[in-house]
Each structure stands twice: as C-alpha cells, then as structure tokens.
Amino acid sequence: MGIMRNALAAAVVLMAGLLGGAPAALATTPTAVVVEDRAGVLDQRTLLPAVQATDFYEPTKVAVYTYNGTAADNLNEEVLRFARTEHPEWISADGQKWADGLFIFALDPVGRHVGTYMGEDRKVSPEQREDIQNAAKELLRDAQWTEGTIAGIRRGAELINQPWYRSTAFLVTAWAAVAAAVCAAAAWLIVRWRTRVSSRKELARGDASYASVSMDLQVTELNASTIPESSRYGSTVLEKHRTFVNRYGTATELSNQVHAFGSRDLSRRPNLKLVRSYADAAAELDALDDVIADTNALLNRGSSWPAAWDRQLAPFRNDLDGVEDLLSQRRAEGTSATAVALRSFRDESRRNMERWSTELADGSITPETALDRLRDARTHLSELLKNHADTLIQAFARNEKEAGLMREEMDSAQAGTKARYGRTYEPSILGTVYPSYYFFSVPSFNTGFSSGVSSVSSARGGGTTTGYGSSGGSFSGSGSSSSF
C-alpha cells in the first residue's frame, strides 16, 4: 500500500505539471445553423434547439444536409454538387476548399451514408472525422435520424479546434505516463486480488455441488439401478451413469488439490484454472444425478413423476415464454410470416403441454411417448427459429457476404462452437440424451443474431470515402463519408 500511495502522489504531481500552463478552453454556440433536409427525415423542432445549444471551441457555422440517394452514391460528390448549386457560400473564394468557420454534417438515409466536412480552419484528422461519424452510426442504424445527427454534431463540437490539453493524443500520452507510475505498483496487486476473489467464488460453487453429489451418492445409485434399460431414454442416461463413479473420483481428486491451496496459491492464475475445473466437474455431476433421479421417477411413474415431468418441460416452456420478447426487439421483423408462425406454434404448444400432462396422468400415453412429443416439438421450434433467422438476415444484410457473416454467427450460436457462446449442459433427460447443439433455443438465437449484426456493422464501418468523384475537379476540401 505504501508503494501505491507513492505512485499516486507522483502521478498527481506529473499531471499538475502537464496542465499547469494550459489556457482555459472557450465555449461558444454556433454562429448559425442551416438545415437542408431534402430527405425529409429530420425533426427540426428537436434538431435546431439541440444544435444551437451545442458549445464549440471556436465560432462555427453548422450546416446539415440530407438527401435520398443509393448505396452506390458518393456522398462527398453529392454534398459538393449541392453546395455549388444551392450554397456557394459554403465554398472558399478560390473554389478549392470548404469555407472557413464551417462544419457540414451530411446524411443519406436511403443509401445509408454519413459524411462530415470542414473549413480549413476547422478541419480535424481523418481518424477524428471517422470518430464523429461513428458517434452517429448506432442511432442512424436504428433510423433515429434526428438523434443521430445531433450526436454526430455534438461529437464534432468536442473535436473541432480542440485545445491541445484536451486532445486524445495528449490525454493518451499523459495518462500513459501516469499509468506507468501507478500500474507498476498496482497491476500486480490488482491481478492477484481479482484472481483470489474469483478462485474463492469458484471454490464455493464447486463445494456446494460436490457436497450435494456426495450426500446423494447412495440415492443416485439406487435410482440408476431401477431405470429400465429397455427404454431408449433410460439406456442413454444409464450410459452416462456408468462414467459417473469415475467422474466423481476425478472431482474428489480435484477437491483435495484445491483445498490444499493457501491464500497465496489462490492468487495465481494457473490455480484459478484448476479451481474452475473442479467447480465445473462438480456442477455437471450435480446436474446429472438430478437427471438420473428424474429419469427413474418418470419412466417408472414413481410418486415424484409429476415434478420430474415438469422439469423436462421447463426448457421448452422458457423458450416459448421468450418468443414475444424476441419478436418485439428492434430489427426483429415481428410482423413477418415467420414471426406469425412462431407465435402460432407458441400458442399451440402451450395447449399441447397441458394435454400431454393430462394424458400422462391418466395413462393414455407412456412417459416415452411424452418425451418423444416433447423432442419433436423442440425440434419444430428449432426449425421455426432457423426460418425466422433467414427472415432477419434477409432484412438486415445488403449482400451475400453480409448474409454469410450473419449465418456463421447464428450457426455458431446454436452449435456453441465459439468461446463467447458458452453452451452449458442442460439438466434434463433430453439434454442428456441429445447433444447441446441439437435444439436451437431462444437465448442462443438472440445471442447469434446480436453477434451477426455486430459483425456486419463492424464490416460496414470500414468503407470510408474521401474523394469528391469525377465532378469534383480539383476541389480538395477536408471531409469524408462512410456507410452505416
């Protein structure tokens, strides 16, 4: 802690020295705001007050221009054409640059381009122009044209003529120096502290599961001994049980290892990995012994079969409950034919689950038949979700390359092939009998689609255009555009 205090004191002195001679930054609202909303997408009652109240570092005239173009258009060329025709005062006297003191924010909501242009005394770096455009893109992608325009202009005000001591380059340099002073003392301590906290959390998780499994060992063996091996479901669960004892022995060895660790040992990352392995192994065993108990109760129609059956329905019921949330999200195409099919299936399935439970209770169907019906219903839901994924991909993707990116993310979400998806063992009979990727769940769908949109959006962000096209001539004003 003494090292930390000394490092922090040095950092304060360093920052004070760097900022001591910095002048106070001025704040001035725009000298004028001109809005040429040729696309008809802006709410000027919201836009004008927001822009007029925005503080710039230097007196700046703000111009906003929108028009409906196409994805193939060069927005830079269009803005220059419009300025030459309608607002020659936006161009310098020699016709080669944008006028001094000017900041133009341009938007094409149909072609999905956004552009920023500045006079020579207001220009920023290409990276900062991209920063301004990126500040607007998330809102523009959601068709929030007015809010996106305001966000872009406000970010421009933060960067245009920004004082040196507020610039990113300065702050990065300054804080790098501060970080060098602080991190040398703090990083090691913080990493060890966080590792120790994580290790203890994982240890507690593992101990809870291991204790539950250990207490129920005899009951688990008894349940397994009476599961009918002639059943398709029972035989597969029994195959899992045959490895149960060996896996319990492995978990016991891991438990002995991790409980021998002292506080310092728990602060080391290799040991955290070992503790996490213990917790995962114990948790899966704890889930499996519950499945063994449910399989025995349901297939033999023991006294607890209704609760066991309800646990088999739970994953499917949760998916059905999540359908409406899925379809009400933005970009969810909630009125499409595939959305209608999902809602219809949800309502029908809720009725079916009640009927299956009634027929199980009066003996009209066997437990195996009930599980078959549940499997078929979950398989049908998976197909409907895949169909709806195609609808969403078709609506969002602009070309086959983007569609391919989105399909890859959706497929990976279902299969759990990427680390971020973290597919876990489903503690049910169907989850034990079938692999984790067999059923497509609503949470996996949501994760896959969100990842697909992010992948495509990131790919789109790379298309920056800086030239003014064939009609621009020798014009070389500061500006660029990009797609969103």
Image (tube, rainbow, N blue to C red):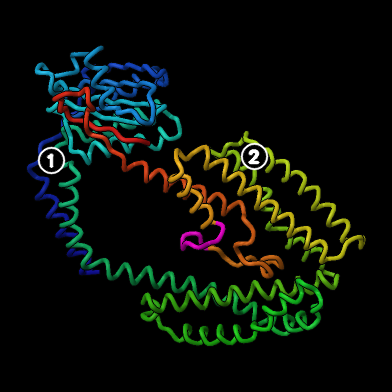
From the viewer's perspective, is residue 261 above or below residue 78? below
Quarter-of-image position of residue 215: bottom right
Q: Are marks 2 and 1 in contact (CB under 8 Å)?
A: no
Label 1 element class: helix
Quadrant where the C terminus lies?
A: top left
Q: Label 1 belongs to which residue?
A: 164
- Amino acid type of the residue tagged 1 in the rendering: Trp
Sequence-wise, the earlier of marks 2 and 1 is: 1
Badge 2, how many Cα within 10 Å: few under 14, some, many 20+? many
Label of residue 339 in the image: 2
**Residue at 62% of width from left, 67% of height from top?**
435
**Residue at 66% of width from left, 47% of height from top?**
384
Badge 1, how many Cα within 10 Å: few under 14, some, many 20+? few
Horizontal side of 221 relative to 102 (left or right) equals right
Give 271 or 8, whichever is nearer the viewer. Answer: 271
Write down the region rendered in magenta: 414-422
Give 204 or 303, whichever is nearer the viewer. Answer: 303
